[in-house]
Amino acid sequence: MLRFQHIEYLWFLLVIPLMIVIYIVWLKQRQAKLLKIGDLQLVNELLPTYSQRRNTIKFTLLVLALFFGVISLANLQSGARSEKVSRKGIDVMIALDVSKSMLAKDVSPNRLEKSKQFILRLLEKLSNNRIGLIIFAGKAYTSVPLTVDISALKMNLSTANPDMVPTQGTVLGDAISMASESFNSKETKYKSIVLISDGEDHDETAIDQVKKAVDEGIMINTVGVGSPEGSPIWDAETGENKKDEKGNEILSKLNENELQIIAQNGQGIYKQLNNTESTVAAIVNQINAIEQKNFGDTLFVDYNSFFQYFLAITLLLIGVDFFIPSRKKILWV
């Protein structure tokens, strides 16, 4: 069985077709300029050291080096050994607020990116559990259902942004409801929701959804991102902070009270995301207090990595490209 250990690095492969398009456009523009000077064959004779063939070879080597370099980073692996192990854990649904207010920069680099950093660290600490991801703003969507495939969850997390949810706002109740529906309704324990938001709630049903979730045996922990003092919201479309009708900058404030009430009623805890490590530790400790279920016998695979071979090919291609001159030598007689 083959797999990539770091599948998120494969996104870099999208650079290759872009490079090819740019190179083709450059070739056409160069040829058009030469044609303006005069006959193409005559102009090429006036440039005896220039070699289009060598430049194309060097470009091809560069593209191949990038391709194999990305494969090396992603680390292609194959299963070498397998055995059955017993695994215990719980089901955790992470609900991430991707509303435009999460682009505020009162935490570095901004609220959304800070939240993603927190989630990545949380995933490392909850590796034995099944985890899913919900993104929400004015509406909630299931990005990744409950899974043990953390690499897929990381990839979806990396692309999460406000544009993925056209309806803006912050409907915490909708996110909690969708997260609750993701669990096995026949179980009354082994379930937790981690809600990450700035708490700018415009949904009055949130507490009702929290109580309903608790009745189904779900613990809800909340993480607040931002500052109570507030911060302007960056608008990528205009290149400046968002403003109201009067031209005043709109401030987005962390609504800690809302998130604290949700956590209290959800039999969980609330933490403000200032220090990532301490916040992760607190949430993990709270989740680990839940009784764990046996997921049964799980197939464990020990993998062989092949990144070193692709890295060697990459270095070889770069070396060959370096020693091929882009210009021809002229032998004078």
Image (cartoon, rainbow, N blue to C red):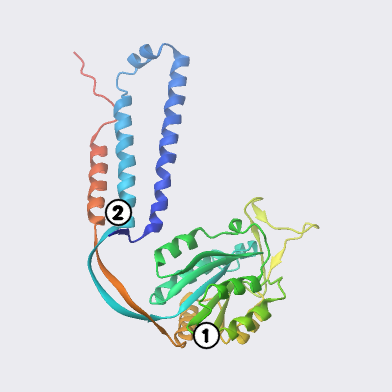
**Residue at screen point 45% across, 88% down:** 291
- In the figure, is residue 225 to the left or right of 31? right
Q: Nearer the viewer, mark 1 or mark 2?
A: 1
Q: Nearer the viewer, residue 6 or 117?
A: 6
The picture places residue 197, in percent across and down from the top left corner, at: 60, 71
Looking at the rendered structure, the kind of residue marked 2 is Ser
Name the spot of residue 23 as percent of width and height, x first. Answer: 41, 33
Quadrant that contains the C terminus: top left
Q: Earlier in the sequence, mark 1 or mark 2?
A: 2
Residue at image point 32% right, 52% down: 71
Q: Residues within 10 Å of mark 2 (few under 14, many from 20)?
A: many
Q: Which mark is residue 256?
A: none
Q: Which residue is identified by label 1? A: 188
Residue at the farthest left position: 333
Q: Where on the picture, by quarter, is residue 53?
A: top left
Residue 72 — which label?
A: 2
In this picture, residue 268 sits left or right of residue 233: left
Of residue 75 and residue 29, the one placed in the foreground of this image is 75
Crowdedness near tag 1: few (<14), some (14–19) or many (≥20) residues, C-alpha within 10 Å: some
Question: Which picture quadrant has residue 281?
Answer: bottom left
Q: Is label 1 in a helix, a strand or a loop? A: loop
Q: Is residue 49 above or below residue 312?
A: above
Instruction: Inspect the image, locate mark 1, and give the three-letter code of the amino acid beneath it.
Output: Thr
Specify whether residue 76 is in view.
yes
Q: Secondary structure at mark 2?
A: helix
Residue 218, quarter of the rendered image: bottom right
Q: Is residue 12 above or below residue 32?
A: below
Q: Position of residue 21 (x, y in %)?
A: 44, 35
What is the spatial separation of the Cα atoms under label 1 and label 2, in whole angstroms?
A: 44 Å
**Where the N terminus falls, by quadrant?**
bottom left
Along the line of sight, the residue nearer the viewer: 83 or 246: 83
Q: Position of residue 49 (x, y in %)?
A: 29, 22
